[in-house]
Amino acid sequence: MDNTETYVWQTDTEAGTVELAQRIAAWAEPGTVIALDGDLGAGKTRFSQAFARAIGIMDVVNSPTFTIIKEYEGARLPFYHMDVYRLSLEEADELGLDDYFFGDGVTIVEWASLIRELLPAQRLELYIEHLGGEARRIRLRGIGAPYAAWCQQLEVMGVERE
């Protein structure tokens, strides 16, 4: 990660994770890239589902673990949901990810740290920690001016600076 500020959202409920996803989705525009990381079962896919719903995706959003990339057409923006857990860096590089990252939609990459070298220079990084039950701690970093501004706006809404 970059040397930018880290922010923390902590919640005891799934609704809190959904709320954060909705807040971030409100700012999404073509070319938005969100890099998600966290242990198995931490809530990466749940965050992605809530985000997708908030940008108008009515389809069921599942983890793209075996398909690698799932594309959804939304009311507001296309949504590209990736899971790169099973890919090598070389395999990921051959997929033409830039077409998604710099395309007309929003991209969420689960296990993004595995392909950090291929990610756009500007992105929002989230690391989700499972704290037991429905409790989660989500660390956010805005890499690049637009995403740093998002984090600062989230701070005004109750996300704490670490």
Image: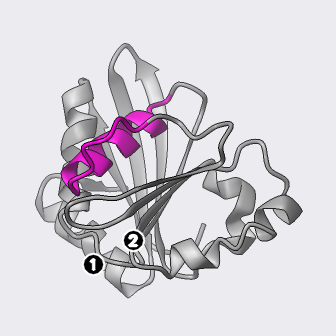
| 39 shown above or below 28 | above
Query: 10 left or right of 103?
Result: left
Which residue is pictured at 68% across the width and 37% down the height? 66
How packed is label 1: few (under 14 Cα within 10 Å), some, or many (20 or more)?
A: few
Q: Residue furthest left?
A: 157
Q: Residue under circle 2?
A: 105
Q: Position of residue 15 (x, y in %)?
A: 19, 30
C-alpha gap between disc 1 and disc 2: 20 Å
The dot on residue 149 is 1
Q: Which residues lie in the magenta part?
A: 42-61
Going from N to C along the chain, the mark reached first, 1 or 2, is 2
Q: Residue furthest top?
A: 133
The amino acid at mark 1 is: Ala
| 83 shown above or below 143 | above
Which residue is pictured at 79% across the width and 69% down the height? 93
Secondary structure beneath dot 2 equals loop
Query: 33 left or right of 149?
Result: right
- For this rendering, which residue is in front, 122 or 3? 122
Which residue is pictured at 72% across the width and 62% down the height? 115
- Tell me the quadrant of the picture where the N terminus can be found: bottom right
Q: Position of residue 14 (x, y in %)?
A: 26, 26
The amino acid at mark 2 is: Gly
